[in-house]
Image: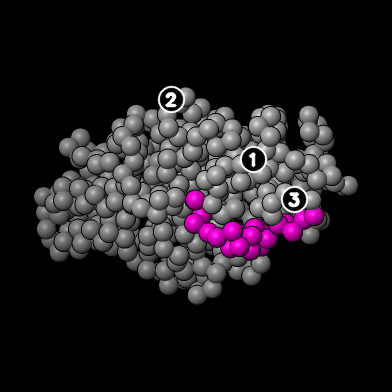
Amino acid sequence: MKSWAEVAIPKLAGNLAVPTLSLTNSKSMQLEALQEKNLYRMYVCGITPYDATHLGHAATYLTFDLINRYLRASGAEVSYVQNITDIDDPLLERAIRDNVDWEKLATSQIDLFRSDMINLRVIPPQNYIGAVEAIDLVSEAITALEKAGTIYAIDKDLYFKNYSSNEFGLLSHLSKLQMQEIFSQRGGNPTLPGKTDPLDCLVWMAQRPNEPGWESPHGKGRPGWHIECTAIALKYLEPELDANTCIDIQGGGSDLIFPHHEMCASQARVLTGKELASTYVHSAMIGLDGEKMSKSKGNLVFVSTLVNSGVDPMVIRFALLSQHYRKDRMWSDSLLQEATVRIAKIRLAFEASSIAPTDAVNAEIVAALSQDLDTPRAFYALEMWAEASIGGSTGGSAQELKQTLDALLGLAF
Ligand code: ZN
């Protein structure tokens, strides 16, 4: 599927050192330095195209955009793959609810998502892959899982035995009872009669009446969600054969840790004998005015709504990054207003004919981001610089600081 337009990224000033990036790995629950590499493989789970792009989505893709930018600034290449779950139950349910064709709904929401990502200056993935276009790939992965003896049928649907991997559960750190509860809340159907284990997951759903289906060696139907991501990641990121893990980073929102990423990891271990990712990174949730933002509450705030009402996308980007990505946080009008004021102060500082010294603030921004993308620390340093500059301090290079802000934070002043 077509990705979105490239974003121009300036180079950092030549004298600015970029230390190794450390990120909190959800599996170890520790801050870990990434292994130094020339090429990083990153997979971030994409949207199901029926509610694009709410601020929770935006915050997630901004988090991985910071990782992408940092690794590139360090001189490495990043192979970045994202999927779109353009066939799944929630999409079909929404299409029925709104009495629209599911394909038209998906297409319109994917277009909207692309324009939101462009507005937010998110670097596009090199491979942006839809579930429908990956059906053959998913089907091959299911055949391989079947050969490994990890698949069984209930009627014509196929299920994967997640406990085929004895490390199942080590990513989410949940008890089996907790996993069953969450699985049930997220469409996993743990009590379905015929299951070998309540936590086994659907990998192929036989076609239902009045629903779309695709021919495959497993019958006519459609893929399950977890195997979609596993198959796309393993194909399009071209894992190195002699590496200990398949890819470097798998990421998404923290609500994907279980069941989605736990189950992808289990499938990948059966398919490759290896851990799917060296580092699992998860971006926390965004609430609204003190409440969880969710489809069921109907309180989603959309990027396009804000932009259409005249909000500068850079203010949205700044506001979402103004708190740490691992902290569940709230969206509010006051956060937006605060970001507007803070950006205005930085713009004002840049307007002076001579600005405050910039070497220290450049180095501090890089240092802050190197430690688990500490954007609040980076923004604090930037504002201290702006205040010094407005106060009359001189001797800095506006161009070098602008390069740092654009290359690493995606903020173009
Ligand atoms: Zn995924």
Quick check: is the Cβ at mark 3 less than 8 Å away from ligand 1? Answer: no
In the structure shown, which secondary structural element does the residue marked by tag 3 occupy?
Answer: loop
Q: Which residue is drawn at 72% across and 44% down?
A: 159
In the structure shown, which secondary structural element does the residue marked by tag 2 occupy?
Answer: loop
* Residue 90, quarter of the rendered image: bottom right
The residue pinned by badge 1 equals: 227
Q: How far is mark 2 from mark 3, CA to CA?
A: 36 Å
- What's under tag 1, amino acid-wise? Ile
Q: Which residue is drawn at 28% across and 56% down?
A: 378
The residue pinned by badge 3 equals: 195
Q: Residue 242 carries which label?
A: 2
Does residue 247 lie above or below 289 as drawn? above
Residue 9, horizontal then vertical, whole percent: 36, 38
Residue 105, horizontal then vertical, whole percent: 72, 49
Of labels 1 and 3, earlier in sequence is 3
Q: How far is mark 1 from mark 3, CA to CA?
A: 18 Å
* Residue 11, quarter of the rendered image: top left
Residue 271, horizontal then vertical, whole percent: 59, 32
Left or right: where 122 falls relative to 47: left
Binning the other alpha carbons within 10 Å of mark 1 as few (below 14), some (14 to 19) or many (20 upward) gives many
- Range of residues picked out in magenta: 170-193
Residue 149, horizontal then vertical, whole percent: 69, 34
